[in-house]
Amino acid sequence: MQTTSSTRTQVAIVGAGPAGLFLSHLLHRQGIESVILEHRSREEIEGTIRAGVLEQWVVDLMNDMGLGDRMMREGHFHSGITLRFDRQSHHIDMAELTGGKRVTVYAQHEVIRDLVSARLEDGGSILFGVSDVQFHDLDGKTPRVQFRRSPDGPVEELRCDFVAGCDGFHGPSRQAIPAATRTEYQIVYPFGWLGILTEAPPSHPELIYANHERGFALLSTRSPEVQRLYIQVDPKDDIANWSDDRIWSELHRRLEDESGWTLKEGPIFQKGIIAMRSFVCDPMQHGRLFIAGDAAHIVPPTGAKGLNLAVADVLVLSRAMTAYYKTGSSEGLDRYSATCLRRIWKAERFSWYMTTMLHRNEHESPFEQRVHLAELDYVVHSRAAMTALAENYVGLPME
Ligand code: RFL
Ligand code: PHB
């Protein structure tokens, strides 16, 4: 491609999701310059509804970075979750089982809003609406990223020391690791989630994960006025088949228990169906390209780990880059993929475990289905099993 202008930075970051934005903040704190190239608009990234649950250490990190004020005011702190099956409810007291750790429910798009505005305020460079991102010389010492600021604009070039591929599952950066050197591990689940946002008051003080013969359901929250709920559906189902009445009727049947608790309804103002997969790419680096977050791995949302894992990757990457710039040592960078993958595989295991235990899967044998129910029964009656679930849910230690 013929380029019209060429600029330089230390780290070119592709994607302004949680991975890219956290990385740019972490590097800035160490005096390392970066430019973020994002192909969607600021309004789009700040309006996309996704995750909700932050692990304790991510909350601590946001506070340490001076980015946590709104989260501490508007987030919801949950020290337990409820598991519901056979119309019985079982409280898992995560704080008591993990020495006081809890999770924070604060929507991913709110995190994005806070990170974007803070980064722009401190002079950071985020280019929104870029297209045609292409990587060059990833094997050399000065990689280049070419892009256009607008679809018909001229090609520009960003020269850098490192490229961070934080462009999500469908972005181009993973494909820039030669196919012959990477292994991809994957499971695609035969079910998906239908998620809604409703203008209703909270129905319950903590999240409810329900295993029901009609399929999984999850009750979560966003604010005193807005609730987030999910039901297991066929991933190929059309959202047009789901009237609001049908969704509420399914939620009531799957979530209600014998105690007389009832779900509070309200107008539904957003709904959609997502497919579920587990995916890991190994290695997560090639030359001077490092991929992070959903670009490198996907977990099904049942364990609430995706966003947290993205932040874990870029914390490892920022530390390795800091060591490189301060001491010249590339040891941390060389080990980046191996360091991240140890945590990633544990999160993959936990997310797969929660998913298989809580969903109904007609492709499984009756034997396997009974084993999942036995697992649930075991988890809620064994302190050891409950502790294992709780320590994974609140987040394994970072070191
Ligand atoms: P993202 O958020 O996908 O951001 C990638 C960014 O890259 C941009 N991009 C490009 N930019 C330039 N050029 C290109 N060619 C590009 N291609 C893509 C995209 O526009 C985008 O802005 O990846 P990142 O940063 O790795 O973050 C990952 C998280 O978003 C994801 O793991 C979580 O949302 C997963 N997840 C959850 N994670 C949790 O930790 N806790 C939860 O409770 C939780 N719940 C969920 C979830 C994901 C869900 N969905 C919709 C998949 C619930 C749901 C329903
Ligand atoms: C959410 O609030 O969106 C949410 C909560 C818990 C999960 C997944 C998503 O496991």
Image: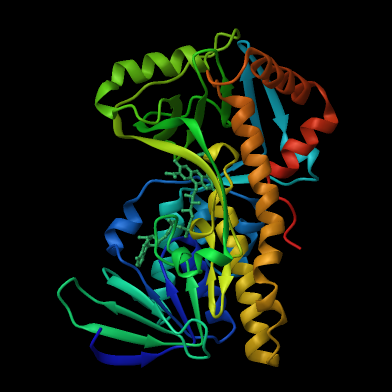
Specify the quadrant that holds the C terminus. Answer: bottom right
* Farthest residue, direction front: 180
On screen, residue 197 versus residue 393, left or right, reads left
- Of residue 259 and residue 359, the one placed in the foreground of this image is 359
Q: Position of residue 397 (x, y in %)?
A: 75, 56
Answer with the quarter of the image where residue 115 lies: bottom left
Camera-nearest residue between 269 and 356: 356
Q: Residue at x 43, y 61 (%)?
A: 17
Residue in view at x 40 percent, y 37 percent: 274
Q: Is residue 39 left or right of residue 334?
A: left
- Residue 69 picture location, percent across and down: 52, 61
Q: Looking at the figure, which quarter contains the N terminus?
A: bottom left
The residue depicted at 50 percent of the width and 16 percent of the height is: 254
* Position in image of residue 126 (x %, y %): 36, 75
Picture coordinates of residue 250 (x, y %)?
A: 41, 16
Outermost residue to the left: 152
Q: Indicate the quadrant where residue 338 lies.
A: bottom right
Can residue 127 be spotted in the picture? no
The residue closer to the viewer here, 348 or 114, is: 348
